[in-house]
Image (spheres, rainbow, N blue to C red):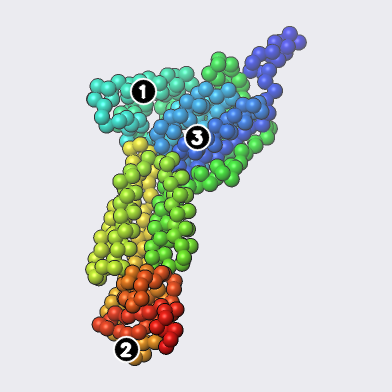
Amino acid sequence: MLFMLAWLALTPAAAQGRGSVYLLDVEGVLTRYSVGVVERALHNAETSGAEALIVRLTVEGSVLQDARRLADMFVAAEVPVVVYVAPAGTRSGAGGAWLLNAAHIAAMAPNTSFGVTTPLVQFGSDLSDDTLELLRGEVATLMKERAQARGRSEAWIADAIREGAVLNNEQASALNPPAVELVARDLDELLTLLEGRLVTLEDGNEYTLRTLGRDVERIPLTLWELILLTLANPTIAFMLLVMAGIAVYAELLSPTLGALAGLGVVLFILALIGLIALPVRWLAVLGIILAFGLVAADLFLPSNGLVTLIGLVVLVVSAMTMFDGTQAPGVAVALWAVMVVTAMIAAFALVGIYLAFRSRNSPIATGQEGLVGRMAEVRKRLEPEGMVFVEGALWRAVSEDGDVEVGEFVRITGVYELRLTVRRLAAPAEAQA
């Protein structure tokens, strides 16, 4: 008896005096920023001798190349990795398919699924059919080998790679052998079901999981990681890009000595940080910029809003096609965000068009004599023609004594056919008057 206890104490399955169970929540869109977060968590788990790393997957979409990178990391991990698709209602998509297949233990909550209805791998469109088939075959072989090594079903893999397949937790469990080992309602049940499970790592070492009574340490995100993951959300990246355009548009509408333009530049940079982590169709981004150009141009064109309408149509089309869904299934701008942004820009544009229309067509309410002699603020540089603001409206104006910068004040000297003539306040002729 003593000999048996001593032998068990020396076996790899019992010799590890491992520590806590680590828990990492992966949410939102799985991108290169997510890979960085998981890589840090995995390193911490390995260096601290954790019992296991549980990756709770609650993703809305995944960049395929980043999901594959993460799957390779899980296979090579030096600590048992458990991928748990949760909570109920999660559709883990392509990321779930790759990561559940690579994990040492695959678990799902009830009413969850993995996989997508499009091919699970994508290659360049310039490849021949024979080359594409060869590459798909290599990926299928890789995923089947991983499934066989874990004792899981490989029946769904070929269809998922070539055509697309979606399996819910019941379908995955019903396969023979099952595609996932465990179905657990919550974390507590998962820890109970993990107890005693045998895990074989890439180096051949075997571990028997002891999860009952272990402390669960949640791995928090750093501030920088949180910022990056937030910016990589496609809806947030889109709205930041739009807000940058609105800030620049507002600067044109009501000059603020560059404050709004500066804000627009900052928002644009933040949007770019998020966009570089996503498969962006840059032609669509140019379409969004063009849409703002059309809306802004309507301030100076007698189109009665037609150019703005065209700009809004371009904006909606560009927003809905902004990301390549074949390279990142499930990654798209939320429809509600497109509608809200369109309504917001339309409201801004209506205000701008109203002011411009008023400046071009409104009669002089107080008569020519009432405006002559009043001061006006330059809103568009007089060189010598531009725009000035007086009596609550924008007016076209011509300077009588050279160029005048935005923000300076001028004196109205005359009104001719809805156009003002103005003179610098510090002009010599006015000083003598």
Residue 35's disc is 3
Residue 370's disc is none
Q: Earlier in the sequence, mark 2 or mark 1?
A: 1
Most foreground residue, 147 or 421: 421
**Looking at the rendering, in which quadrant would you find the C terminus?**
bottom left
* Residue at the image point whose x is 35% and y is 72% from the top: 402
Q: Secondary structure at mark 3?
A: helix
Label 1 near label 2: C-beta < 8 Å? no
Q: Which residue is mark 2?
A: 368
Q: Is residue 228 visible?
A: yes
Categorize mark 3 by other alpha carbons within 10 Å: few (<14), some (14-19), many (20+).
some
Q: Amino acid at mark 2?
A: Gln
* Residue at the image point whose x is 25% and y is 63% from the top: 307
| Residue 194 as seen in the image, left or right of residue 296 | right
Please identify the residue farthest to the right as the structure is shown. Answer: 2
Q: Amino acid at mark 3?
A: Val
Residue 268 vertical position relative to residue 163 in the rendered view, above or below = below
User: Mark 2 or mark 3, which is nearer to you?
Assistant: 2
Query: Which quadrant of the view contains residue 79?
Result: top right
- Residue 312 image point, x, y percent: 30, 60
Residue 140's disc is 1
